[in-house]
Amino acid sequence: ILQLFKREVRIRMNVDPTDPAYKSPWLHALYEKMANIRTYQRQCILVDIEGKGEGSLVVADSVAKRLRVFRGTRQTMEVPLPGESTALCCFHMDETNVPGIGVAIDGALYVFRRLRPETRYVVNDIATIKEEENHINCLATLPKLLSDDTGHGIFTEGKSCPVLGLESRHILILEHTAKRELCRVRLPEIPSIIQVIGCFDIDWRLIVACRDQSIYAVTSSDKRGIALVRKPHLEMNAPIVDLCCLDKNKILIATSDKTIACYSVPKLQNTFAIVQQSARITNLTILQLGGKRGTIILAALNTNGEIRAYRENQLVDILRIGEPISVILAGVYGREHGSLIIITCSGSLLVKMLPRSAKLEVISNSPQKIPPEQNVPLSIPKMPKSFLDQIKREQSFGPQVYRAYRYEFLKLKIATYKAFLSLVHTGELLETQTTSHSTVSIVSTELKGLGPRFHLIVNLIAKKEPAVGLPILIEYDLSQFSCKYPYQIAPVLLPGRETSILFILDEIEKTTSARTSTNVEPIVIFVLSSDPAVTTPLLVTSVNMTLSTPSSSLSVVADKTAHS
């Protein structure tokens, strides 16, 4: 009978132990074909019910409406529920190791302790009309203080707060006693999965996956009891299947397009992506091995019933189950830390354990294999003694260094202001200037003629709306030029159509000996507002001029274009 049982297990696992090409390091601990468990991922947790360091599997059966507890090789207890549950969570209500199990049923959170009813929290009406909008969709646990993490995914002795995601798009954080609300926040969309980073009394962050394929980050504000939705949020290209926290700085997102991507926190920038899988992903979980063994990413595939293990984006193991998978959980079962709980769609229960001596190496034909050149360490030089002395000096004389920096910075600003003022006074900085309420712009200015008569043409255009009756004034050196009409009124200016204004300037005749230079001050063009109350010019620009000489060749003075 034992040989037949082993043969049946090997056929179901679809693994040939004699195959030299692949040997799975997982040890087979339990296979219960007749468990008949009807549940899904968010209704299963691994929890130490009695606080004695022995993990148990707690399942909310959606068909039987019961809490089923599995310990060791059998089911030990059943607890009836008042309705159909939607999610489970585990949190500590006091300083003892005995946790409370929260069960979300409709709009209430039922808390069990040692599998006995402890308390109930009913979600208050949040300005809603429909009663079903207070329905609880998902649960999570936020530590109240930093707890002692054993390195295997278990937190010991520390109060924690249940986190509720509602159909009304609200996130509620309850007190550790689950009797009153600490804070709440409203999301743009309906939450479906919540993951937690940090602790409530110091700094915390909730990573929330919503039904609209978006990821939002919720954090605490400066005032206690107020939560904020941080920007930016993340938009995925496909519906989100599962969400996990790899560590406090990275999150993993599995989508229905058969991909798993890693994003950094808090900027939500893509860090790496696991290649597209051969089948649709149904579940995603993290196995904390502790110490130097690191973290393993486990992904369950639907079609062929495979569970693939990754170290970041490197494939290290493939476990074939042979039928579709409904739930995978990794953590402590009994007293074994490296346990893997598998529940299939047919209701079977499998327990796998990873030996502490197992070495999960990168599979040779894995497409994610890192090239050997990347593993070559960089030759980083050591910090010289002078650099270390500089760091020590800056730490000892921080205020003095800062004052010296501020003094030099202010000297630089004053020198910049002086240089700017000198350019303004000398006229070298006379470029086109425009005000915020300007409705026109100068397209170009043209200077035609060899002297002694010059034609100055100013081309104007309206920006958005027509402009009527804008005065145009030119300023020039009266000792060098004369203009009969230096002040003109522009006709109607239309958007998209240029209008030309002509100014005729005559050079004042002087003897060659009286001229000290052929260069003169530039001509400044002002476009004024038709409103007498507006004293600031709408536009200001300048054109450089050169006096004619008897020996000057026939050449055209270069035009100068100025844009607003």
Image (cartoon, rainbow, N blue to C red):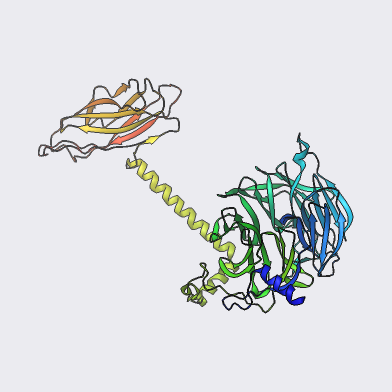
User: Residue at image x 85%, y 60%?
Assistant: 94
Residue 394, by quadrant, is bottom right
**Residue 64: in sight, yes or no?**
yes
Q: Is residue 537 left or right of residue 19?
A: left
Residue 40 x %, y %? 72, 55
- Work out whether residue 220 can be spotted: no
Quadrant placement of the N terminus:
bottom right
Residue drawn 45% across and 30% down? 437
Residue 200 locus on image (x, y percent): 74, 56
In the picture provided, is 385 more to the left or to the right than 97?
Answer: left
Q: Nearer the viewer, residue 192 or 494?
A: 192
Q: Identify the residue shown where x is 75% and y is 40%.
A: 133
- Decide: is 177 above or below 341: above
Quarter of the image with the C terminus is: top left
Displayed quadrant of residue 354: bottom right
In this view, 354 is above or below 248:
below
x and y percentages locating residue 489 in the rendered image = 33, 21
Q: Say which of 7 and 208 sits in front.
A: 7
Q: Residue furthest left?
A: 551
The spot of residue 143 in percent (x, y) is 76, 59
Residue 247 figure quarter: bottom right
